[in-house]
Amino acid sequence: IVTARASAEKLKDPDQLIDSVKTFIFDCDGVIWKGDKLIDGVPETLDMLRSKGKRLVFVTNNSTKSRKQYGKKFETLGLDVSEEEIFASSFAAAAYLKSIDFPKDKKVYVVGEDGILKELELAGIQYLGGPVYGEKKIELKPGYMMEHDENVGAVVVGFDQYFNYYKVQYATLCIRENPGCLFIATNRDAVTHLTDAQEWAGGGSMVGAIGGSTQREPLVVGKPSTFMMDYLANKFSISKSQICMVGDRLDTDILFGQNGGCKTLLVLSGVTSLSMLQNPDNLIQPDFYTNKISDFLSIKAA
Ligand code: PLP
Ligand code: CA
């Protein structure tokens, strides 16, 4: 739901914002790190917020890693963050299936990478597919039919560097032919920054291909859908009005915060520039914006 709001205000009094909430949800890429590089001042900022008793939660739409794998990434970057504080869209897909009591005798067909497989495994959900499955070359001889597993009850689609036509056809058969088969997307980010030299097609490209062949809309579990926000609010018993969502992207992070009824802060350390925020065509306006999260430490109210 996009609602036109008053223009975002430049953050002038971080202490007032900090005092007004109990929980900070941080998006990861563009806020905490950029690719594999830590953004300046992040450790000190997180330490300061923790010393004030704030709960910190980290949410990423990147489904290629599991919570545990992200835990290692935080550690490598020298950040003291536990797995329980990390909510990746890979975890969200498994948590969603658990929340609906996905039948034990059904399987998930995964178009995506290792993170989704690891989370499904931890949730005790059977799966097939993943990053290596679709390498078979299809021999389009007369009479050829691709077989598919009739016990697939859900197709989960996320970013997949090994995406190919085999996978599109397999997912399409499951969704179109297995009665009640779910179509779940971890996220539908249009583009992402796999290298700093250009924008790369994001998870939305894989989701779009399968949406195109099935003519079905996926159920999205990552940002900006409300699934993870509801899950978090429930898990930690937090009121959404006492959360500040901090992100670098308007159509995922800021919308996620607004859909959840949270305060929102856009940082300009990632994909959104001030001119994009202030473009008259942009209807998504956060409550506040600032350059980077370490401004929490350096801006002093006048
Ligand atoms: N999906 C992929 C494949 C990515 O590489 C990224 C960022 O690196 C994202 C999604 C967005 O991640 P985040 O939600 O942490 O900004
Ligand atoms: Ca981001």
Image (spheres, rainbow, N blue to C red):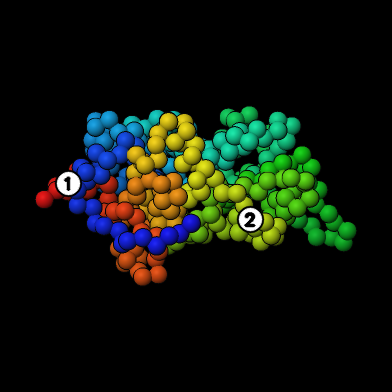
Q: Name the residue type under label 2.
A: Glu
Q: Tell me which residue sits at (44%, 36%) in the image.
A: 233
Give percent across and percent down for residue 223: 48, 48
Q: Earlier in the sequence, mark 1 or mark 2?
A: 2
Residue 228 visible from this viewpoint: yes
Q: Residue 258 carries which label?
A: none
Location of residue 201 with respect to 108 vertically, above or below? below
Q: Nearer the viewer, residue 22 or 182?
A: 22
Q: Tell me which residue sits at (34%, 55%) in the image.
A: 286
Give percent across and percent down for residue 216: 67, 56
Location of residue 271 with respect to 19 vertically, above or below? below
Name the residue at the bottom extreme: 280
Q: Name the residue type under label 1.
A: Ser
Q: Residue 298 carries which label?
A: 1
Q: Distance between the residues labelled 1 and 2?
A: 44 Å
Counting every numbered tag in the picture gives: 2
How crowded is the residue under tag 2: few (<14 C-alpha within 10 Å), some, or many (20+)?
Answer: some
Q: Which of 197 and 6 is in front in this view?
A: 6
Q: Tell me which residue sits at (47%, 31%) in the image.
A: 235
Residue 30 visible from this viewpoint: no
SS for tag 1? helix
Q: Residue 217 carries which label?
A: 2
Give percent across and percent down for residue 229: 46, 41
Name the residue at the right extreme: 143
How crowded is the residue under tag 1: few (<14 C-alpha within 10 Å), some, or many (20+)?
Answer: few
Q: Which of 101 and 89 is in front in this view?
A: 101
Quarter where residue 98 is shown: top right
